[in-house]
Amino acid sequence: MKKIILLTVLLFSAVQFTVAQNTIAKLKFEEAEEAYANNNFELTLTKLKEVETILKSTNPRILYLQILSQTKIIEKDGWKDYTITENTRTSIEKYLKEYDNLPDNEDKYRDIYKISENFKDAPTSLQDFNDRIKEAGLRAKQAEMLIKSGFKFSDKTYEMGTIKGQNGECKVESFVGGESTTDSYGFTSRKINKSEYWGGECKDGYLNGLVLMTVYGDKKEYKQNILAYFVIGRVIYPFLNTYLSDDNALFIGIQESDGSYGCLSVANENSWNLVDERQMCVNMKEIYGEQIFSLDFMRNFKHGNIDLKELEKKFKDFIMSGKKITRE
């Protein structure tokens, strides 16, 4: 009888311990979800690891949030850590293999599938990873030279979107802001997902170099052409832009990280010229030559027919000269 009572007590204690474990695991998972919502992806992974340690296993919910967090870290930092790259690849493969027939999981499975398609650009070996690190070092030196010349990146980090172009599909940051006070799609990929580029190169899936780009998206109100320099998918400010209106009006202006303004507008009833009054317009004339404010160039810029090779040569000559653009 005593043995039966003792066994019952032990079983009850084990059940209580298991219930307590599950409660703590649930609380830890909620903390992971909260961290993810606050864009603290490293903390999310830490909390998910604690959940796995408590449960001594993983599950679809844990693995799903883990993959999303790892992907966000890679989007922010690029392929800088081979361990997280390889762990993410392993997690994706596990999820797609083991949870394909899970009930009520179609949407999440589709999310992971889309991530797996984008992950095809990831380094496939440690040697590949090291080669990319070397390339990134060269890009970093290039970025340093651009910054010394007065150019700059945005202080904020935006999500990467995929666009099509002359050298295949390529990733660029979602640099287009909201177009009205009620526009909630500013700086999201839906502002650029129908864009097309010419020139530059698509290295390791990211756009680099001087490009002509028609900027458009399913949540963008109007098309623009820009002449801009990219480094690992990030745009350098300032850059030139124009609008693709249907009329005969011509416009060329400057896009900064915190706003935009015009240099020259030629229209039937509303023409103005501020090229020599706005310092950045003067800078652009010094970099690319006076012809960028000619009617021929403005017309060709609007219709996407400019000599990129010649413009890139002038841009690089300016950077290598040690000159620096100045702001008002």
Image: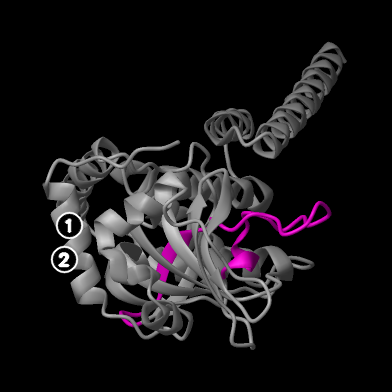
Amino acid type at mark 2: Lys
Q: Is residue 183 above or below residue 10?
A: below
Q: Which residue is mark 2?
A: 313
Which of the 4 quarters of the picture holds residue 245?
A: bottom right
Count how many numbered circles sit on residues in the image. 2
Q: Is residue 64 among the parts visible in the rendering? A: yes
The residue tagged with tag 2: helix, strand or loop? helix
Majority secondary structure of magenta residues = loop
In this view, which residue lies farthest toward the top?
Answer: 2
Q: Real-space Cα distance between discs 2 and 1? A: 5 Å
Q: Position of residue 269 (x, y in %)?
A: 68, 77
* Marks 2,1: beta carbons within 8 A: yes
Q: Is residue 193 above or below residue 234?
A: below
Residues in magenta, as a range: 166-192
Q: Please report the residue visible at 59 percent of the width from the left and 32 percent of the height from the top.
A: 40
Q: In the displayed structure, does residue 105 sit left or right of residue 278?
A: right
